[in-house]
Amino acid sequence: MIADDSPENEVTTSSPRETDTGTRLVGTRACIRCHHELDGQPIIRLDPEGLLVARCPECGRASPILEYPVLGHWGSRLGISLLLIYIVIAIAAVLSLATACFAIALEITQPTTRRFSDFVQSKWEATPKALTPETYDPWRTEVAWWNESGPAILAEFEAASGLGFKSLPMTEMGGFLLFSVAFGVIWAGLFAGVRRSRLWILPIVSYVITMGLAISVTTIGDGPLVAVWDIAESVRIRHLLPIALLAGTVGLEIGVLFGRPLIVKLAGLLLPPNRRHDIESLWRVDRKH
């Protein structure tokens, strides 16, 4: 049988025409040839078929924009379970860091608190009422006496020894700042899906919650007597701890704001060229296309 090669039986072929849709691919999607990450690439339409594709910036291959196979109910349950695990890990990381920062701040303010406790005790022992056997206790003062004399004692101690930023050890404060910067960088990587324009709020919220809880649970009591150390602890929470924790909050903010560029640069030095795209989500989430 002889094939008919007449012009009227020829099939007309043409190269597909590309039309930019004006949108970009959002989400993790790999190139079907070189597996390069396509997140953020323009979505184009191939006419006349109308197929939507994203062209790989590395190899130039056009990968169709198709939905991945649905795994059914168990797939959605697995995804929800993994999301809950991630949320639990993130909350645990935030609480652990807040607890660690609180403990470090308490340790930094310990010397000043001890000096203030000794100062209050010396003032209590010098009162004529404290010398009477019925009320004398070197470690416990009268609440009424502290409410009346406390402001003057606090002002005198602040004028003599300082009760603020200058009274805290600068070496420990600097170390606390560097410690917080390192954890801020870890936060920037842990919360990779959150933009830096929103992530900076997290250290502020942690600071406010920590100080609010500390102040709410610190009281000198309403009885007739109060321990001198409880008075010193109350002053520490209200006058020293906010300053010490502020150093940690500033360090976290520095780490959060500059952590992702630092991770990307380190990855560029340590990872092979064909694996550097694995951490591109750290800067794509901040719209740096």
Image (cartoon, helix red, strand yellow):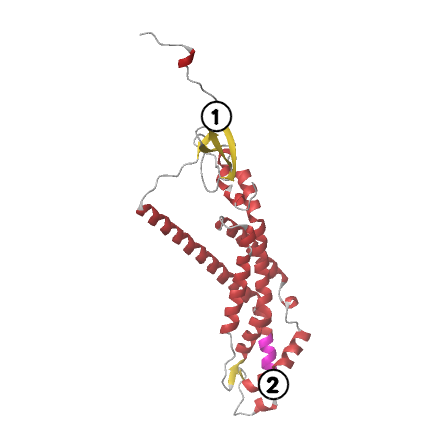
Please indicate, yes or no, whether residue 34 appears anywhere in the rendered image. no
Residue at the (61%, 81%) spot, across then down? 150
Residue 68 percent location from the top left of the image: 38, 39
In the image, 214 versus 286, the foreground residue is 286
Residue at the (54%, 44%) spot, across then down? 283
Q: Gap between marks 1 and 2, in whole Å? A: 88 Å
Please indicate, yes or no, whether residue 247 appears anywhere in the rendered image. yes
Quadrant of the image occupied by residue 151: bottom right
**Sequence order check, earlier mark of 1 and 2:** 1
**Quadrant in the picture for the C terminus:** top right
Identify the residue under disc 1. Answer: 16
Across the whole image, how many numbered discs are drawn on residues? Answer: 2
Residue at the (58%, 56%) spot, across then down? 251
Q: Which residues are magenta?
A: 116-125
**Up-down relation of residue 126 to residue 75 (above or below):** below
Residue 8 percent location from the top left of the image: 41, 13
Queried whether the magenta region covers residue 144, the answer comes back as: no
Quadrant of the image occupied by residue 239: bottom right
Q: Amino acid at mark 1?
A: Pro
Q: Are marks 1 and 2 in contact (CB under 8 Å)?
A: no
**Up-down relation of residue 220 to residue 101 (above or below):** below
Give the class, few, some or many, for how many residues have Cα within 10 Å of label 1's Cα (few <14, many ≥20).
few
